[in-house]
Image (cartoon, rainbow, N blue to C red):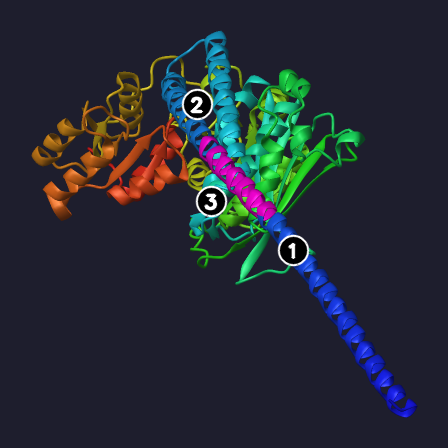
């Protein structure tokens, strides 16, 4: 074979060998890539499997935790429900017993008692009221913490809750020899809209706190139009400034920034020393915040402390004509050593459209009376404080001297405890006695119109000035025909006697079924229905009465120890028209009677 051919042949083999080797390398590289990709895919699958297993584990754990949380929630809900039911039952039982204690004490107030007996009675009633307030504090604080408090809006007369506050605290104040004063500025509107229950609660807490921490002197509840409030009035609301000032020890500097704090309220030392739950201020602060108002406290430069709150309350209607508008030329001079008492009496006389002056000096009073007489006053009245009168009896008697130009002046005495006044002791005639603090416009006006020798005017009943002992006998009255339905003998007896003292003709029923039969057989003006009764409760009884009598059914008022908002709603849903909580008091019964019945008439009418 020629050399070129041989070389060509050899070269061609080399190329083939080279190509075969390259293909082998490419195959090996592809296989390696495939192997790597396979390995990566395997790792990814392993990682995914691990992640999936972890997710399943987490999901299982979350489900387990969720189930446990749901179980815990159910347990807590059951425990909370059990606690609520326990508190409601405890509250109902305590209120039922307090109804007998406080109601019996109210009934005994009208009796002729010796001073030590009256003091023991005041102690009994004050202690019962303190226990009642402590119970309400605990329940209210629990409701606030669980968000169950709601603010309602309804028309109300501002004077009524303020009077209730002062009257309820009067026994304790009398026991501590404190003077309570209520001042409502003449320009403050009385017919407002808002949550009267919460307004009463806030102010009662502030007042009771002041009475509790004041050893001597006075506690003043004042209402006036707010000046320079930082908040803006909404929907035509009037910003009212409420203040409670006292002559106590003041507020220590280290407590001024935390006095409304719930932790400060839990100070057991204060509660043991002064009584009460210690939650009053914390509750008031939270309620004021819910109503969009402001609250604060300060020590007074002259001693004592002042708690204040500003609330926006819409004016519901224009003020009616003053009761004393027709009392043309009557002139009254207020003589009292306490400035706050003079301001309170002057504000009431201004609202009654009666000309008045005020002083703490007998000589100045004589000058004022003489000037009023010279200006043509047809009737002169000196409205004076009892303690001032006893300390200055001889000086006052000089006004009655033959040479005195104002000897025709009528003397009207203001006394914190008219029932305890002795039959003798003053050197001048008294036309009538009015209870102090002055609270009701009607009572003051009637006292000013009373002629000498007629019955005295006062919220605890009428009696002649300095009349000797003897049980008071109310005049025969054709009052409302009322049915009291209650299975508890003590509550039934107390409610019935209180209503009888208010002039009602009372019948009683021991069960709901008996009440239905009585309502079918007789015409009642009003029914007071207990809610918790065996066999047939008050709700079912009310519904059956409505179904049986129809439009002729009398107004039915709940008289119950269950006083929560839910209980109130349940009463109204059953067809009841009003609500009175136990322990019942004369003021609340009077309110209901005025609202749902016609005024009682005497036989002489």
Residue 103 on image: x %, y %: 37, 21
Q: What is the x, y in percent for residue 43?
A: 68, 54
Which secondary structure dominates the residues rendered in magenta? helix
Callout 2 secondary element: loop
Q: Quadrant of the C terminus?
A: top left
Q: Secondary structure at mark 3?
A: helix
Q: Which-is-in-front pick, marks 3 and 1?
A: 1
Tell me if residue 390 can be seen: yes
395 lies left or right of 60:
right
Q: Nearer the viewer, residue 18 or 421?
A: 18
Closer to the observer: label 3 or label 2?
A: 3
- Marks 2,1: beta carbons within 8 A: no
Residues at marks 3 and 1, CA–CA distance in whole angstroms: 76 Å
Q: Residues within 10 Å of mark 1 (few under 14, many from 20)?
A: few
Could one spot residue 333 in this view of the protein?
no
Q: Is residue 145 left or right of residue 316?
A: right
**Horizontally, is 562 left or right of 188 in the view?**
left
The structure residue drawn at horizontal position 63% and vertical position 44%, both measured from the top left corner, is 309
In three-dimensional space, the C-alpha distance between marks 2 and 1, rounded to whole angstroms, equals 110 Å
Residue 396, disc: none
**Dot 1 corresponds to which residue?**
42
Give the mark, 2 or 1, whose residue is nearer the N terminus.
1
Is 171 located above or below residue 151 in the figure?
above
Query: Does the magenta-highlighted stretch encompass residue 454?
Result: no
Question: Which segment is the magenta one?
Answer: 53-75
Q: What numbered label is drawn on residue 465? A: 2
Kindly indicate the quadrant of the structure image that contains residue 28: bottom right
Residue furthest to the front in view is: 1
Does the CB distance between marks 3 and 2 fall below 8 Å? no
Q: Most extreme residue toward the left, as rendered?
A: 521
Q: Which residue is mark 3?
A: 196
């Amino acid at each position: 074979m020629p050399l070129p051919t041989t070389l060509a042949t050899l070269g061609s083999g080399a190329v083939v060998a080279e190509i075969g080797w390259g293909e082998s390398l490419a195959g090996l590289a592809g296989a390696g890539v495939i192997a790597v990709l396979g390995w990566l895919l395997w790792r990814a699958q392993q990682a995914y499997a691990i992640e999936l297993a972890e997710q399943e584990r987490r999901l299982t754990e979350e489900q387990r935790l969720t189930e446990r949380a749901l179980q815990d929630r159910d347990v807590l809900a059951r425990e909370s429900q059990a606690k609520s039911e326990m508190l409601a039952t405890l509250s109902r039982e305590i209120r039922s017993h307090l109804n007998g204690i406080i109601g019996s004490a109210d009934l005994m107030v009208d009796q002729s008692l010796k001073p030590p007996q009256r003091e023991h009675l005041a102690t009994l009633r004050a202690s019962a009221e303190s226990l009642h307030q402590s119970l309400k504090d605990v329940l209210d604080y629990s409701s606030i913490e669980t968000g169950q408090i709601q603010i309602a809006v309804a028309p109300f007369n501002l004077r009524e809750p303020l009077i209730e506050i002062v009257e309820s605290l009067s026994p304790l104040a009398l026991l501590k020899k404190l003077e309570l004063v209520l001042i409502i500025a003449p320009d403050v509107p009385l017919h407002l809209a808002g949550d009267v229950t919460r307004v009463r609660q806030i102010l009662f807490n502030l007042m009771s706190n002041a009475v509790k921490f004041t050893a001597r002197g006075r506690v003043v509840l004042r209402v006036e139009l707010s000046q320079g409030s930082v908040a803006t009035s909404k929907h035509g609301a009037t910003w009212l400034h409420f203040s409670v000032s006292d002559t106590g020890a003041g507020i220590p500097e280290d407590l001024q920034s935390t006095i409304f704090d719930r932790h400060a309220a839990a100070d057991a030392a204060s509660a043991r020393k002064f009584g009460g739950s210690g939650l009053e201020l914390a509750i008031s602060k939270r309620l004021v915040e819910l109503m969009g108002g402001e609250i604060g406290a300060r020590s007074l430069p002259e001693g004592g402390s002042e708690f204040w709150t500003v609330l926006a309350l819409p004016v519901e209607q224009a003020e009616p004509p003053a009761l004393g508008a027709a009392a043309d030329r009557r002139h009254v001079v207020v003589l009292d050593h306490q400035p706050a008492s003079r301001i309170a009496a002057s504000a009431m006389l201004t609202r009654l459209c009666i000309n008045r002056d005020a002083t703490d000096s007998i000589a100045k009073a004589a000058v004022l009376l003489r000037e009023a007489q010279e200006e043509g006053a047809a009737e002169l009245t000196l409205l004076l404080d009892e303690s001032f009168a006893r300390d200055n009896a001889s000086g006052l008697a000089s006004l009655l001297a033959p040479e005195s130009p104002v000897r025709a002046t009528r003397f009207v005495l203001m006394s914190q405890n008219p029932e305890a006044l002795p039959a003798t002791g003053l050197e001048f005639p008294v036309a009538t006695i009015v209870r102090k603090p002055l609270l009701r416009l009607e009572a003051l006006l009637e006292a000013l119109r009373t002629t000498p020798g007629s019955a005295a005017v006062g919220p605890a009943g009428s009696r002649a000035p300095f009349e000797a002992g003897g049980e008071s006998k109310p005049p025969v009255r054709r009052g409302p025909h009322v049915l009291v339905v209650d299975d508890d003998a003590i509550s039934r007896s107390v409610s019935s006697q209180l209503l009888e003292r208010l002039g009602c003709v009372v019948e009683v029923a021991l069960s709901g079924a008996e009440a239905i039969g009585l309502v079918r057989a007789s015409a009642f003006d009003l029914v007071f229905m207990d809610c918790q009764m065996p066999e047939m409760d008050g709700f079912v009884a009310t519904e059956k009465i409505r179904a049986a009598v129809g439009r002729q059914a009398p107004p039915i008022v709940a008289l119950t120890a269950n006083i929560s908002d839910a209980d109130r709603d349940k009463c109204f849903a059953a067809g009841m028209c009003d609500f009175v909580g136990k322990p019942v008091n004369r003021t609340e019964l009077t309110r209901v009677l005025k609202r749902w019945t016609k005024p009682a008439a005497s036989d002489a009418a």
